[in-house]
Amino acid sequence: MSDQYDVVIIGGGIIGLSTAMHLLQRHPRLRLAVLEKDGGLAGQQTGHNSGVIHSGIYYRPDSLKAQFCVDGRAAMVEFCEANDIAYERCGKVIVATREEELLRLDALLERGLANGVEGLEMVEPDRLREIEPHVVAIRALWAPSTAIVDFTAVAEVYGRRVRESGGEIHVGARVTAVVRRDGVSNIETEGGEYRARFVVNCAGLHADRIASLMDVRRDVRIVPFRGEYYTLRQDREHLVRGLIYPVPDPDLPFLGVHFTRNVKGYVEAGPNAVLATAREGYRKRDVNLRDLIDTLGFAGFWRVARRQWKTGAEEVNRSFRKSVFVRDLQRMIPEVTAADLRPGGSGVRAQAVSRDGALLDDFVIEQTDSAVHVLNAPSPGATSSLVIGRHIVALADEAFGLE
Ligand SMILES: Cc1cc2nc3c(=O)[nH]c(=O)nc-3n(C[C@H](O)[C@H](O)[C@H](O)COP(=O)(O)OP(=O)(O)OC[C@H]3O[C@@H](n4cnc5c(N)ncnc54)[C@H](O)[C@@H]3O)c2cc1C
């Protein structure tokens, strides 16, 4: 392929597509292509998540997550309205079921207020019963602005906008090598070669590999954590009106198994967080040797494992024993039984881990003079996708001197 692009974006998930859409909005004459390895768009994390438009409660006030999530929620709701994408502002409760969780619940309220989350309210059991009649808790944090949406539908609209603005989207184009020569990146894919002045790496579960091909941040590795769901039987869906979450463990970037009403109407319980033996390992039996060696051969993984082995073992136990999963759900809704739940889908989170063993909590987006790399964009990455796209455009303008 002899064509040369101004910008090539690697990865056709919600972040790559948002970035492409915003780049073309700002620079209408830009020659831009999105390269996606799968046969269609948004088939990885974007197509396997909980579909929650988060409000921004959990994140440290000075973090990118806090800023991008709060602004991203507002932007996402506006985008859905403008493009007729179904969403529902069903609200969410975070419930304390044990005395020792109350202080952490207070801390979450404080964080949420510091982050500017709208409408937050601490509620006692009487009020909680009006919101979620089947939940039993000592106290709860009510976040009425949290909403639900199908992020695949959102990403499809981003993709349509990219094409309408003259951008190209190539599927079946897995990037295997990137070589920079004379101010041009030669990008080899399974679907041919592309040349670009600048590259944006939005490869999700494989973002570290693309970065490494381009000699960037070899000290960070994606460790995949699968999240498994159960689906609530239809005749028991009345037990859940909106979104019901436990108080999370502050040492982990995961939120604990919860109930989520889906915009398609059904209710899911999950996701847990178990180490996956393949980056796209959606089933327990999926093993990819290269992925496994990458994880096990990384010193950072072992440092996390040494610190979190107990939590890891509990997660594996919960993954294999439905009774343990159900017990955790019953802490919030005692009426739920094992017979109410059938196995549902799963997703795999791209969680970046540093060599010194930190599970990177915040979004990590780095720039060089010829590329921008999205190295860590776990939840609330989908909620924040519009704002992350704009942020990348600002970085690209500065780093690449686009005009
Ligand atoms: C279980 C789970 C639940 C979640 N729940 C929520 C939620 O409720 N709310 C929320 O806001 N966020 C949630 N998230 C996070 C959210 O899904 C992600 O932040 C978001 O989808 C990240 O988008 P992305 O475009 O970076 O990644 P992806 O959607 O994974 O896209 C990356 C793309 O790059 C492609 N790619 C990879 N390597 C190559 C290559 N070499 N060449 C070409 N293409 C390549 C992949 O095929 C993929 O399509 C959840 C995630 C998971 C896994």
Image: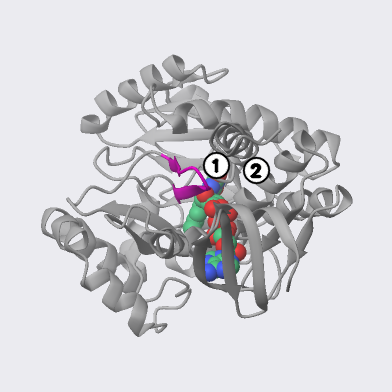
Q: Nearer the viewer, residue 182 or 260?
A: 182
Is the residue at mark 1 in contact range of ligand 1, meaning its CB lies under 8 Å from it?
Answer: no
Q: Is residue 14 visible?
A: yes
Q: Choose top left, top right, bottom left or bottom right for residue 401.
A: top right
Residue 359 image position (x, y, % from top left): 28, 49
Q: Secondary structure at mark 1?
A: strand
Going by the numbered disc 1, the residue's amino acid type is Leu
Q: Secondary structure at mark 2?
A: strand
Q: Quadrant of ligand 1?
A: bottom right
Q: Residue at x 60, y 75 (%)?
A: 189
Q: Quadrant of residue 232?
A: bottom right
Would you place residue 160 above or below residue 95 in this image?
Answer: below
Residue in the image at 32% along x and 37% along y: 97
Dot 2, how many residues are within 10 Å of its Cα: few (below 14), some (14-19), or many (20+)? many
Based on the picture, tell me whether residue 12 belongs to the magenta stretch.
Answer: no
Which residue type carries mark 2?
Ile
Q: Quadrant of the N terminus?
A: bottom right
| Residue projecting furthest to the left | 306
